[in-house]
């Protein structure tokens, strides 16, 4: 039996209060992210994306945040992957960031939609060439017999576009934007009396609340 009952950590690095946070959650997120960058936190843009299928089955995975535009959180994927299909069927989703180095967490709930083809193409063609090849080669989320299949497909794609530094974007690949209606900021505190500040969408603005830990 795996017993983890005595595995715990005390948090004491910072505080968080509704009287000192930014007026909007996007501004607060950007402030925290700037502090992460200064602290050299590894992969600060890694986030858990949770989706729900049309039948109500939940699933989650780690993806990378690639920007915030018009108050929406942007990431990219294969539209034919499990997450891509689920977001097309049911756009309600959740994002979660956990930064243990600063004892912080951000929880986001919102609605996802595809971004424009032009925006997806611009980002796709800014990626390293091998990443572009991989996007063409991988039938994401499909069961395959072994890795050799992927390597063979990658070689075929590489040869197909030989001489091109920038590949055309695959039709099945692109970005999603998540428009949030709820964002919670969590700061670890001693004795498990953590600070939790909640922003909820209120018309054109945001309502601020403090939550019990």
Image (cartoon, rainbow, N blue to C red):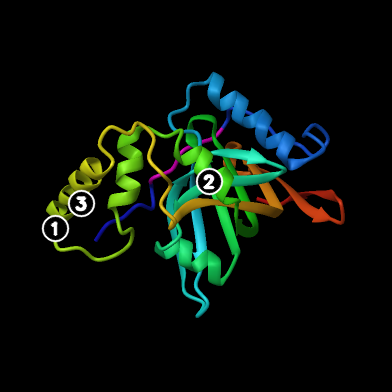
Pointers 1 and 3 in contact (CB under 8 A)? no
Q: What's the distance in space between the residues labelled 2 and 3, CA to CA?
A: 23 Å
Q: What's the distance in space between the residues labelled 1 and 3, CA to CA?
A: 12 Å
The outermost residue toward the top is: 38
- Which callout, 1 or 3, points to the residue nearer the camera? 3
Q: Position of residue 22 (x, y in %)?
A: 78, 34
Point 69% across, 49% down: residue = 183
Q: Position of residue 24 (x, y in %)?
A: 79, 40
- Please tell me whether residue 37 belongs to the stretch shown in magenta: no
**Lateral position of residue 188 relative to residue 164, left or right:** right
The circle on residue 120 is 2
**Considering only order in the chain, which callout, 3 or 1, is on the residue closer to the N terminus?**
1
**Considering only order in the chain, which callout, 2 or 1, is on the residue closer to the N terminus?**
2
Q: What's the distance in space between the residues labelled 1 and 2, CA to CA?
A: 30 Å
Pointers 2 and 3 in contact (CB under 8 A)? no
Q: Position of residue 194 (x, y in %)?
A: 63, 43
Q: Which residue is mark 1?
A: 146
Q: Work out whether residue 50 or residue 79 is closer to the camera in this orientation and state it.
A: 79
Position above or below: 88 against 115: below
Point 79% across, 54% down: residue = 201
**Considering only order in the chain, which callout, 3 or 2, is on the residue closer to the N terminus?**
2
- Image quadrant for the N terminus? bottom left
- The magenta span reads 7-11
Q: Judging from the image, what secondary structure is the residue with disc 3 in? A: helix
The circle on residue 153 is 3
Point 29% across, 65% down: residue = 142
Q: Main secondary structure of the magenta part?
A: loop
How many numbered markers are drawn?
Answer: 3
């Amino acid at each position: 039996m795996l017993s983890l009952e005595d595995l715990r950590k005390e948090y004491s690095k910072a505080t968080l209060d509704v009287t000192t946070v930014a007026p909007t959650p996007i501004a607060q997120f950007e402030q925290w992210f700037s502090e992460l960058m200064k602290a050299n936190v590894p992969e600060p843009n890694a986030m858990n994306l949770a989706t729900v299928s049309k039948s109500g089955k939940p699933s989650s995975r780690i993806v990378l945040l690639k920007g915030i535009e018009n108050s929406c959180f942007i990431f990219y994927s294969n539209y034919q992957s499990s997450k891509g299909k689920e977001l097309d069927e049911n756009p309600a989703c959740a994002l979660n960031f956990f930064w243990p180095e600063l004892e912080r967490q951000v929880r986001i709930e919102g609605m996802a939609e595809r971004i424009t083809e032009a925006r997806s193409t611009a980002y796709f063609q800014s990626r390293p060439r091998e990443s572009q090849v991989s996007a063409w080669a991988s039938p994401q989320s499909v069961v395959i017999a072994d890795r050799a299949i992927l390597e063979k497909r990658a070689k075929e794609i590489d040869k197909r576009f030989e001489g091109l530094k920038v590949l055309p974007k695959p039709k099945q690949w692109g970005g999603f934007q998540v428009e949030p209606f709820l964002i919670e900021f969590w700061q670890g505190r001693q004795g498990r009396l953590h600070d939790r500040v909640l922003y909820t969408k209120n018309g054109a603005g945001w309502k601020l609340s403090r939550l019990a830990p």
